[in-house]
Every structure is written in C-alpha cells, then in structure tokens.
Image: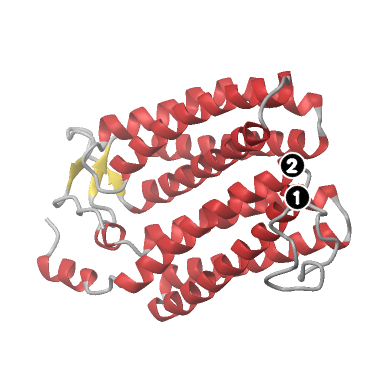
Amino acid sequence: MANPSSVAKTSAKFSQATFVVAILTACAILPLILVGAGVTTTDAGMAYPDWPTSDGHLLNPQGWTESSPTLFEHGHRLIGWVVGMLAIALAILCWKRRGLCRVVGLGTLLAIVVQGTLGGFRVTEISTTFAMIHGMWGQVCFCLACTAALVTSRSWINGAGRIQARSLRFFRRGCVLALVSVVIQLGLGATYRHFDSGHALIGHVLWAVWLVLILGWAAFWMLGEYPRDAILGKLGRALGVLLITQLLLGGGAFIVVVMGGAWSPFLMWAVPSAHVLVGAAILACMVMTTFSSYHLLCEAPEHQDAGVATSSTATAS
C-alpha cells in the first residue's frame, strides 16, 4: 500500500493550468490536421506561392475566403498560428514543472516550430516530398501534445507503478509493435496521397488487415485487464472506437477517391481528410498506451491476477 503522505505530496505537483493548456494544444492540432489533409485532397498547397505571408498579408489576404484552394491553404496557416501560440504557453508552463513534463513541453514546441518550417519549405521549394513530410510530422506534433496532456494529468502523476500486471513484458512489446505498425501504415497512406502510388495503395490496404489484428488485440487487452483504470481503461475504449471508425472511413475513402464517381466536392475532401485525422488519433492513442505501459504498470507476482492495483486506481483528471 502506498504511503498516504507520499500520495499527497505527489498530488501537490499537479497543475490545472498546465493540464488545460496541454489539452487545448492537442485539440487545436486536430483541425490543423483536418484542414491540412484537405489542402492535400484539394491540391491547394500552392494556392499562395509566398510564405510565411499569403499574398503579402499575414492574417487577412484579400479574397481568401472566396475560393476553395485559398480558403484551405490560408485557413491552415491561421490555425497553425493559433497552435504555435498555445505551444509557446505550454512550453512556459511545462518549464516550471521540470522533469518529464519539461521535456515533453519543450519537445512539443520544437516539433511545431519544425512543422511550420517544413510547411514553408513545401511552398518555397514547390516540393511534394516536403508536403508529405510536413503532413506526417503534423501527426508527430499531435502525439507530443497528447503526451503532454497525459503526463500533466493527475492520474499520471499519482499512478506510477501502481498496477500489478501479468505478462507485462509481452504487453509492452505488443504495444511497441502496434505503434510501429501504425507508423508504417501512415507512411503508406501518405505516399499514396502525395505521389498517387498504386503500390503504396496496395500496401496500405493489405497492411490494414494486420493493423486491425494488432490494434484489436491491444484494445481488448486493455479492456480485459484494466477496465477501471483511469488511463488504460479509457485508452482501450478510445482505441476500439477509433479502430471501428477508421475502418468505415477507410472503406468510404476507397469508394470516393479510388473508385471515383460523381461525388459531391464536400465528400471528396471530407472523407479522406477524416480518414487521415482518425489515423493521427490512433497513432496518438498507441503512443500514450505505450508510455502508460511503462509508467503505470509493474510486474505482478505469478500467484496474483493482472490488473490488481497496489493502491486505489487514480481517478480521471
């Protein structure tokens, strides 16, 4: 049983402001990914050939809302400014917390600065390669922001090594394998979207079969072993919902984009863009699951059941 005084001491380290800003930063990146995917889908990446301004204007170029390409491209840049400001605030707050919180906060800011620079290179160099790297790196930024929200939550701060788990090494290795598998799938999808590679599309579809198996295993493991845990239980439920949603969106994207037809312009960008967005959410979910498996769990003695907490499970923040 954990010492109550040590728990109280750990709880005092929780910062509501830091946690809220981390959540806001992660949430702000979601529309950035969605609109960015729309930029690729509508081929609007060069709607404004200058950077960091748009037609010489930083915030409000004339007529930017009047056409789809300029709306997507400049809207993407505006959301990027908002995300950058939130990332600066997060880094400042995390700097005061020290430890892992400081590392993740600064890492999120650095990743977003790199992301903006990659976006600039995509425009100034008129490079599809930079466009693909820019798109994938945006998902890394989202994962870092989600990790910042995770490590600043009360459940994480109070939950180190509290849950005894069977087959812990197997679960951890499975999480890492699932995480790498998601990265490969996102890379195949990005290659198809940016370079219209038929081989990448075939690989993307075939690899999805393996991904359903490994992610389904991870979700069922968490729901079966840690259903009441404030972090792993929620991650298991989220992963299950995201996996089902992604399968539906993947099928929809294949019908709308690959098979073609007289679809509305809205569906033509919304379905594949949502598919990209949910893919980023699955990646973030597996990143947080992997970190949590190392932080929250400890190996249980062979005679004990999995999921037995050494102290009461932390409540959700």
- Image: 125 above or below 55: above
Judge from the rendering whether residue 149 lies leftward or rightward of residue 176; answer left or right: left
Residues 164 and 150: in front is 150
Amino acid marked by disc 2: Thr
Residue 220 picture quarter: top left
Amino acid marked by disc 1: Pro
- The image position of residue 170, as x and y in percent, is 41, 34
- The image position of residue 133, as x and y in percent, is 74, 51
The CA distance from mark 1 to mark 2 is 7 Å
> What mark, if any, has residue 109 been given in the picture?
none
Q: Secondary structure at mark 2?
A: loop
- The image position of residue 186, as x and y in percent, is 64, 38
Residue at 72% in and 54% down: 66
Residue at 26% in and 33% down: 225
Q: Are marks 1 and 2 in contact (CB under 8 Å)?
A: yes
Q: Secondary structure at mark 1?
A: helix
Instruction: State the quadrant of the N terminus.
Output: bottom left
Residues 155 and 33: in front is 33
Q: Which residue is mark 1?
A: 69
Confirm whether residue 167 shows in the render: no
- The image position of residue 101, as x and y in percent, is 42, 69
Q: Which residue is mark 2?
A: 42
Instruction: Decide which of tag 1 and tag 2 comes sooner along the chain.
Output: 2
Judge from the rendering whether residue 310 lies leftward or rightward of residue 224; answer left or right: left
